Image: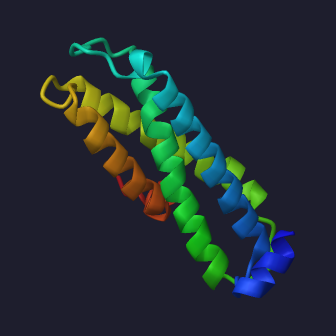
Amino acid sequence: MFKKLCKKIGVAEYRRFRWATWILLFSMGGLAVVINNRDAFFPKEVVSDIDYLYRLLWVLPFAFIGFSCLAFVVSITHDGHDKPWSSYIFNYFPRLIALSLLIFSVLHLFEASSGIVYYYFSSGLALYFGFKIETFKLENIKI
């Protein structure tokens, strides 16, 4: 199904397109769960506990949506025939989770960004950094 669709719309790499589609669909499903349980995820008063992990579950889908946009772009421009599952599961997904944890912990740490501003700022940061995840490689960090 994806092979025929990709040939029709001119996408070079159907495997990456398939991964990007499934990542996007699961991320949107995760956001639907968050919005349906808004009482647990969006408290009325400011929560100052660092162990309030519902907010981490708010950031994760946005990071994965940003990454799925990157995967869509790569599927259009990349014409290699390698299988993307190993690099996605063992390379990009741990980096996306670590980046989401970093965004959660830094923004949740300060009282000024722990209120309603957290949701807007963290979702935008996660989208951007999910799309630019290629820049966050351990081998590029110089000490």
x, y percent for residue 51: 39, 14
The structure residue drawn at horizontal position 48% and vertical position 48%, both measured from the top left corner, is 63
Image height of 101 relative to 50, above or below: below
Residue 137 visible in the snapshot: no
| Depth order, front residue of 27/102 | 27
**Colour scheme employed for the rendering of this structure:** rainbow
| Depth order, front residue of 138/92 | 92
x, y percent for residue 14: 78, 74
Residue sitting farthest toward the front:
36
x, y percent for residue 82: 80, 73
x, y percent for residue 48: 24, 13
The structure residue drawn at horizontal position 38% and vertical position 37%, both measured from the top left corner, is 102
Tell whether 117 sits left or right of 13: left
Q: Check the picture and name the quadrant holding the N terminus.
A: bottom right
Tell whether 38 sits left or right of 68: left
Image height of 121 relative to 66, above or below: above
| Depth order, front residue of 129/141 | 129
Tell whether 66 sits left or right of 24: left
Quarter of the image holding residue 129? bottom left
Residue 132 visible in the snapshot: yes
Image height of 88 relative to 13, above or below: above
The structure residue drawn at horizontal position 60% and vertical position 53%, both measured from the top left corner, is 92
The structure residue drawn at horizontal position 46% and vertical position 46%, both measured from the top left corner, is 62
Quarter of the image holding residue 121? top left
Q: How many marks?
A: 0
Residue sitting farthest toward the left:
112
